[in-house]
Image (cartoon, rainbow, N blue to C red):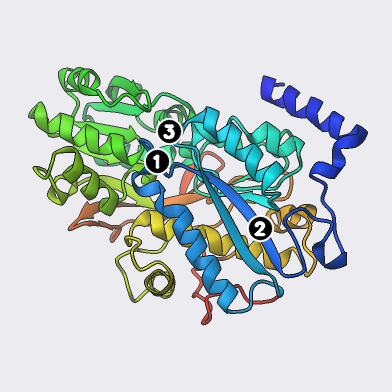
Amino acid sequence: MTHRSLAALAASAALATGVAACGGGGGGGGGSSAPGVTKSQVTVGGHFPLTGPAAPGYSQIPVAIKAYFSHVNDQGGINGRKLKMIARDDGYNPTNTVKVTKQLVLQDKIFAMVGGLGTPTHSKVTDYLNSSRVPDLFVSSGCVCWDEPKDHPYTFGWQPDYEVEGEILGKYVADKYKGKKIAYFGQNDDFGADGAKGLDKFIPSDQVVARETYEAGNTDIGPQMAKIKASGADVVVSFSIPAYTALLKLAALKLNFDPTVVVSNVGADPATLTGLLKSFSKGQAGGSLIDGIVSDTYLPPIADDSNSWTKLFKGMRDKYAPKLPWTGNTLYGFSMAYTFAEALRKAGKDPTRKSIVEAVETGDLPGPGIVPFRYDGTKSHAGYAGVQVGTVSGGALDTSGNERQVVKDGEVQTTDFKLTEAPPKGVPPSD
């Protein structure tokens, strides 16, 4: 058992002997016994990097969540209750994450944590949230560690985990670039490590010529990129947040180094990267520098206005947050918020913390995803099961010609998951 697991077990025992009131499940009576639930409102919260190195792009997520909640509220709410989102800034700093999470639970008395962002940040609060029995829903990170239903029964992933994403990208690289020299570049934590673990399952070890990492907050990645160039790499696979993907491209440009770049979904949003490149280079570099990046998605195509989900969410953005850029991170926020609304609807007319956990565990949350969820009772709290690979072209990810894929029993497989249409009013329908 891990140190985190022991801490959670000890805290749970303390709760059982008399601290249950601080986070109990509650139920009945119009939801009054469930923290964060009144007869007219459900209040949730999340920690996000509204400032700091991860703010570009990721700070758009809570704005999109609030915009979706505003739409739901205008439609009468979920089971008669309006939705409220409290987003607190942690600056992508784990110490701050601990502080603001306790504020959300003890001061704001949230019903659930929704979309807490970051692997190094959120991993510092999972024990606390679980020992307090606060539903920890849809962590904005693909760490495999969110899928620990025995040790952390209240925590759920949402996006594909980085190992699954690494496996699918790894198979793509192995098939597409046979015999080429491959270099890895990743964040020096579970984010980068999980991605590399997935890559290693499919990319032959003798093709991997360099493995470099970066520390979030240290923007000088020149030495790492010099080593990658010296290795003779033809392809660089990066598990990086957007700022470091942009820095990678600029460092390579400075070195006159032009490898094929393959990037995890979380660090490859074209609009975010274009803005970062212009900012970092003081206008000298722009969107053309990202053309050719290989990445993936598990959500509807952001540039396809004929897609019912894209059209729906873009319309909500226009109405409720017109200054919010239309990016992959914005789409992410709307999509996650919709998933929360689905779960809350299924949690019943008088939702409790227990009932919303059980609602997510059913896995019956069709939503906007192009691949299925892996939620399966207490067996799996993992999020989406796979991705669709594509290439950035003209400021958008083009997935044409590539199948939607999932990982099942250690194998990358094509999925026939049935896509759903967005509900006409944009609110999850009643069962």
Residue for badge 2: 43
The numbered dot on residue 398 is: none
Left or right: 15, with 414 as reference point: right
Q: Amino acid at mark 1?
A: Thr
Where is residue 249? Give x, y as percent: 19, 36
Q: Nearer the viewer, residue 180 or 218?
A: 218
Q: Residue most toward the right?
A: 17
Q: Nearer the viewer, residue 30 or 208?
A: 30
In this view, 310 is above or below 201: below
Q: Amino acid at mark 3?
A: Gly
Q: Nearer the viewer, residue 80 or 150?
A: 80
Of callouts 1 and 3, the N-terminal one: 1
Give yes or no for contact between labels 2 and 3 (Cβ–Cβ under 8 Å).
no
Left or right: 27, with 136 as reference point: right
Q: Nearer the viewer, mark 1 or mark 3?
A: 1
Q: Residue at x 68, y 24 (%)?
A: 4
Q: Residue most toward the front?
A: 107
Q: Residue at x 19, y 43 (%)?
A: 279
Of callouts 1 and 2, the N-terminal one: 2
Where is residue 39? Give x, y as percent: 77, 69
Residue for badge 1: 51
Spatial CA distance of label 2 from label 3 is: 34 Å
Where is residue 277? Give x, y as percent: 19, 43
Spatial CA distance of label 1 from label 2 is: 23 Å
> How dense is the environment of label 3, judged by Cα within 10 Å: few (below 14), some, or many (20 and up)?
many
Viewport quadrant of the N terminus: top right
Where is residue 113? Give x, y as percent: 63, 48
> How dense is the environment of label 2, judged by Cα within 10 Å: few (below 14), some, or many (20 and up)?
many
Viewport quadrant of the C terminus: bottom right
Residue for badge 3: 195
